[in-house]
Amino acid sequence: MTPPVGSSLRGWLDHLQSRGRLAVAQPDVDLRFGVAGVANRLDGRSASLFPRPGGHPVPVVSGLLSDRAWMAEAMGVPPDGLLERYRSACLEPVPSREVETAPCQEVVRSDVDLTTMLPIPTHNEHDHGAYITAGLLIARRPGTGVQNVSIHRLQVSGPDRLGALLLPRHTLAFFQAQEAEGADLEIAIVIGVDPLTLMASQAIVPIDHDELEISGALRGEPLPVVRCVTNEVRVPADAEIVLEGRLLAQVREPEGPFGEFPQYYGPRAERHVIEIDAITTRESPLFHTIVGGGLEHLLLGGIPREASFLASLRRSFPCVRDIHLSRGGTCRYHLYVQVERPAPGEAKNVVLGALGTHYDIKHVTVVDTDVDVHDPTEVEWAVATRFQADRDLVVVGGSQGSKLDPSTDDGVGAKMGLDATVPVDAPPMKFTRIAVPGERELDLDALTAPAPAGWAEVARG
C-alpha cells in the first residue's frame, strides 16, 4: 500500500508545488505582521514559503491545510469521503513504531534561546508578541505512559519560557494530576509535522487515546516515533523541530492577548507556563506557523470535530446523514445537521444531542436531505421557509460554552437550536421545491458558447 501524499511534510509541499498551490515569498519578509499578512492574502489559494524571514536562516511555511479539499487529498480520499476516513481512523488506531534514531534529532541544543534559534512570527495587531501556533503539545500521562496530542497557543515569554492557554481538555487533566502531587508534567512541542499527524492531533476522542496512533491509521502504517533526549515523551521521528520541556507546577504568569479563531482576541490573564530544556531539529528545519483566525486555523479544528460529532450523533439518531461546522460560525460554534425522515419531535432531540457533543457548539440548525449543509445559503433558505420561532426554536440558558466567545460570561451562555425540517404532517406539495426537469443533465458546453461581437445577428438566426 502506498502511503497517502499527506504522510510527509516535505512530500506535501512537493505535492502543493506541483499543483500550483505553493507560493514563495521574497526573502526577508518581516516576522512581525509580514509573514501573517502574506499568508492571509494567499489563504485558501496557496500555501506560503518564506525564505530567510526577518533575516532568519530557518524558513517559515504556512497555509498547509487551508482548504477542505486539500485535507481530503492529503488522506488520499475524495472530498465526500473525508469525514468517513477520519472517523474510521479514530475508531481503528494503529500503534506507533519506536525508532532509535530520527531526523528530528540530527541537531541537539541544550543552550536554549527561542528568541534567536527559531523564526517565531507575531501575527495580529494586538498579539502580545511572538507565538508558536502550530506546535503539537505532546504530554505523557504519568503512571500509564499514554500520550495526548493537542495544539495550544504558546507565547514566547523568554529565552526558554512559554506561556500556554490550556482549555479544559486532556492535557490540562494530565497536568492537574501531576500538579496535585507537586510535580511538573514532562511535555514536548513538535513543530513541522506531516498533514496527517497535524489533522490527527485535533481528534475529539476519549482521554487515554493517543492521537499519534490516529495518524498511523490515516497513513495505513505505524507512525515512527522517537524518545525525547531529556524526557520520556515520544515524538514523530520525521518532525522538523522539537522543544523538550515541562509544564511547571504551581507557576502562573501573564499570557495574551492573542488573535483567536472567533476573530477576536483572547484576553490577557495568568496562565500556565512551560520551561524548555532542549531543542532538537533536523539539519535544515522548516518552521510551520498557523495564522490565528485564518482558514488553516479554522479548518484544522473544524474537520476533525465534524467527523467526531457525526459518529456521535449517528449512534443515537440513525436519521442523521451529514453535518457541517460553518465558516461563518468559526468552524466551532454553528453546526448544521442533515436528517432523513425524522420521526415527530426527533429533530428537536437531534438539536439537544448536538448541543451536548461539545461545549463549543452554540447554535444548531437541523435540515432535511434536500438541503446541502455545506452551503450556508441553502441552510438559510431552509430556515426562511420551514422554521417558525414559536414552534421550532429550542433555547437552553446557563450552559457551558467557549471561553473564547466574547458574548459569554466567562464561557457560560445560552445555546439555541432551530428545527428547519419540513413538518411531518405537511401536505405533499406544500414544501416541494421547484425544479426544472433535466436541468442538471444538460451538456452546457454542447448547447452554449460565448456570445460573439455580432450577437444581435446571431439572435436573429
Image (cartoon, rainbow, N blue to C red):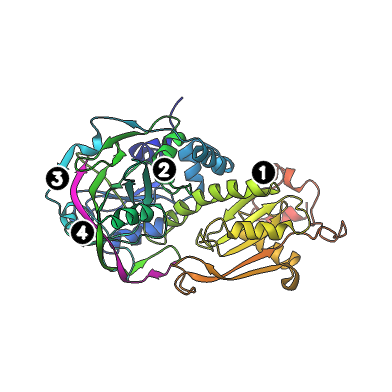
Query: First in sequence: mark 2 or mark 4?
Result: 4
The image quadrant of residue 167 is bottom left
- Residue at 21 percent of width and 48 percent of height: 58
What amino acid is labelled 3 in the image?
Arg
Query: First in sequence: mark 1 or mark 2?
Result: 2
Indicate which label's residue lies in the foreground, 1 or 4.
4
What amino acid is labelled 1 in the image?
Asp
The answer to whether marks 3 and 2 mark residues whose Cβ atoms lie closer than 8 Å is: no
Which residues make up the magenta segment?
263-281
The answer to whether marks 3 and 1 mark residues whose Cβ atoms lie closer than 8 Å is: no
Q: Secondary structure at mark 1?
A: helix
Q: Nearer the viewer, residue 453 or 256?
A: 256
- Asked whether residue 230 is drawn in magenta, I would say no
**Which numbered dot is residue 109?**
3
| Residue 318 in the figure: left or right of residue 51 | right
| Residue 54 in the figure: left or right of residue 415 | left
**Which numbered dot is residue 445?**
1
Locate residue 130, reporting x and y percent: 26, 62
What amino acid is labelled 2 in the image?
Glu
Query: First in sequence: mark 1 or mark 4?
Result: 4
Locate residue 43, reporting x and y percent: 42, 56
